[in-house]
Amino acid sequence: MYNRCHLIGFQLTAENANEKNLITGTRYLNIEGMLPFENMVADYVQETGNHVLYRVTPMYEENNLVASGVLMEGYSVEDNGTDIQFCVYSYNVQPGIIIDYSTGESYAEGTSSNNEETSQTTETTNNTSSTADYILNTNTHKFHYPTCSSVDTMKESNTDYYTGSRDDLIAQGYDPCGRCKP
Ligand SMILES: [Zn+2]
């Protein structure tokens, strides 16, 4: 249910493990809440070469360990916000799951927090996860996990950053790396 959630999307920063950029977020927040805006900004920058002012602020209530949501703001610079201008609040929620934001504990709706159904529900949700961060080699058309040792030797000009599904990458003509086996 929980993902490593990049505040500023991996495809926008190429930073995978900067602790200042990571929070505990639900898969639903990542995919349904944040990814559409990250893709919109990434596409705009790629197509125009323009810049986007971009800020993501996690919102914590009181001393909660888990953020209630994130505030996402974007504004395209060269065209004064004509193409990109948004300020949205994305909730850190997962349908069917109740989250205790003070501790991070979670359980399925209609169950108590300590029975067996909890872990099963969480596991099932995890297994359906099909979106991840990948590094693309646009020259060889291989894709890698960000942690793959091959990535260190790749030329910057051949490197691209991608957040999405493995199947989509393969459909785009990319092959999984033989070393990190993504
Ligand atoms: Zn690899």
Image (tube, rainbow, N blue to C red):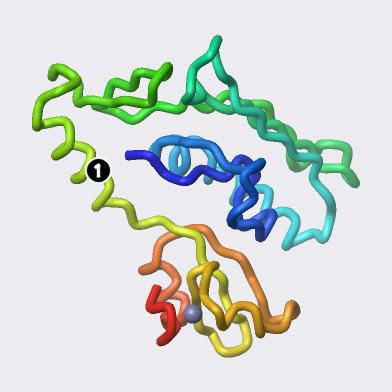
What's under tag 1, amino acid-wise? Thr
**Figure check: 156 above or below 96:** below
When asked about the image quadrant of residue 171, the answer is bottom left
* 10 Å crowding of disc 1: few (<14), some (14-19), many (20+): some
Where residue 14 appears, as percent x and y from the top left, is 66, 60
Q: Could you tell me which residue is drawn at 35 percent across and 18 percent down?
A: 100
| Depth check, front residue: 41 or 62 | 62
Is disc 1 placed on a helix, strand or loop?
helix
Residue marked by disc 1:
125
When asked about the image quadrant of residue 54, the answer is top right
User: Which residue appears farthest toward the bottom when viewing the image?
Assistant: 140
Where residue 111 appears, as percent x and y from the top left, is 13, 19
In the rendered image, the quadrant that contains the N terminus is top left
Q: In screen coordinates, is 114 left or right of 68?
A: left
Look at the image and tell me whether residue 43 can be seen: no
| Depth check, front residue: 24 or 140 | 24
User: Which residue appears farthest toward the top when viewing the image?
Assistant: 62
Q: In screen coordinates, is 17 left or right of 107?
A: right
Where residue 157 appears, as percent x and y from the top left, is 75, 80
Q: Could you tell me which residue is drawn at 43 percent across and 78 percent down?
A: 180
Q: Could you tell me which residue is drawn at 52 percent across and 58 percent down?
A: 163
* Label 1 C-beta lies within 8 Å of the nearest ligand 1 atom: no
| Depth check, front residue: 16 or 138 | 16
In the rendered image, the quadrant that contains the C terminus is bottom left
Q: Could you tell me which residue is drawn at 66 percent across and 41 percent down?
A: 20
When asked about the image quadrant of residue 116, the answer is top left
**Figure check: 120 above or below 149:** above
How many numbered marks have been drawn onto this rendered protein structure? 1
**Figure check: 64 above or below 14:** above
